[in-house]
Every structure is written in C-alpha cells, then in structure tokens.
Amino acid sequence: MDNVCEEQVFNSIFRAHSKTIFNYIYYKYGNEEKAYDAVQEAFVKLWENCAKVIPEKAKAFVYKVANNLYLNVLKAEKVRLKYAEKAPKNPNAESPEFLMEEKQFKEKLDRALDSLPENQRTVFLLNRIDGKKYTEIAEMEGVSVKAIEKRMHLALKTLREQIDGI
C-alpha cells in the first residue's frame, strides 16, 4: 500500500492538487499571496502528518487545511480591524471648537514668529522644525553655540509672552 510519507507519493499528490487548491482558495478569497501561503502551509502539514493520512484522503486533507488556514488569517484580520476601530480617537479633534482654537493658536503662533528678529526666527525654525542641533545651526550661521543658545532663549521667551504663557 502506498504511503504519503514516501517522497514519490507526496510529490505526486502535490503535483496533482496544489494548483487546483491554490485556485480554489484564490477564487474563494481573492488574495493571491495569502492563497499561495495557505497552500504551501497545508502541504507542510500534510508532510508533518503523512503517517496519519492515507493517499486517498490526502486531497481532502489539504483542501480542508488550506481553507482553515485562510479562515484563520481572515479571522485575525477582522480582530485587528475591530481593535483599530476601537482604538481611542481624539474626540475633540473634529469638534468645531477644537478646530477654531487650533486655527486661532496657529494664527497667534504665525504672528509671534513674524515678530521675532530674523536671527531668532531662523534659529527657532531650524531647531524645532528641521530638527537641527545648536552646533549645526552655529556652523550655518557662522557664530558660536552660545550665541545660538542665547537666540533660542530670547525666541522662546518672546513666543511664550505673545502666546499667553504657552
């Protein structure tokens, strides 16, 4: 009697059914990559259980395993989606009050930035927006790091005063 654990028997089962099982999973769920993965994994499971599966039942075994593997992938995706939907969202982010306050703050900040002397504004923006370090800014401006620290200190002090202690 043939045994699925024999390489020849296993290979013939693979050749005879892998493409049809792939098509079955792909047509059923519409994802080529995941269908391919499910078929590969199903045949690995067949090999791992070769002593328990008779050749006549191998096709049904692989179909069932591939389908179950794919269903598990779908279930995991649904859980991830459900979790993502329940992730806390900022409830104020869309409220008109929040949007108005945000707009007013941005206008205040823009006015405050415009009021800064050019050297302070440049240092502030290079550091806070571009993420440049004081040493890099000092090189760019051709001044000492101490001068950059002083400019940043003055810029922050002015901004705080003009934006109501923020």
Image (spheres, rainbow, N blue to C red):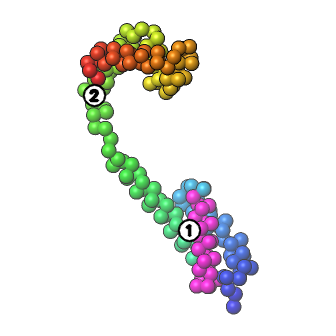
- Residue 112 vertical placement versus 130 (above, below): above
**Which amino acid, mark 1?**
Ala
Which residue, given by chain and number where applicable, does mark 2 sit on?
Answer: 98
What residue sits 67% from the left and 65% below the top? Answer: 19
Residue 108, position as x, y percentages in the image: 32, 16
What residue sits 52% from the left and 66% below the top? Answer: 69
Residue 57, position as x, y percentages in the image: 60, 81
Query: Which image quarter is the C terminus in?
Result: top left
Of the two numbered discs 1 and 2 on the same chain, state the one appearing first in sequence.
Answer: 1
Which residue, given by chain and number where applicable, does mark 1 sit on?
Answer: 66
Q: Quadrant of residue 107?
A: top left
- Residue 96 vertical placement versus 142 (above, below): below
Task: Left or right? Give the position of 120 relative to 23.
Answer: left
Residue 20, position as x, y percentages in the image: 64, 67
Q: Quadrant of residue 151?
A: top left
Outermost residue on the bottom side: it is 1
What residue sits 28% from the left and 28% below the top? Answer: 98
30 part of magenta stretch? no
**Which amino acid, mark 2?**
Phe
Q: Secondary structure at mark 1?
A: helix
Whether residues under marks 1 and 2 lie with C-beta atoms below 8 angstroms apart, the answer is no
Q: Is residue 16 visible?
A: no
Q: Nearer the viewer, residue 57 or 78?
A: 78
What residue sits 33% from the left and 49% below the top? Answer: 86
Q: Which contiguous range is marked in magenta?
A: 34-59
Residue 122, position as x, y percentages in the image: 47, 15
Q: Main secondary structure of the magenta part?
A: helix
Q: Secondary structure at mark 2?
A: helix
Outermost residue on the right side: it is 8
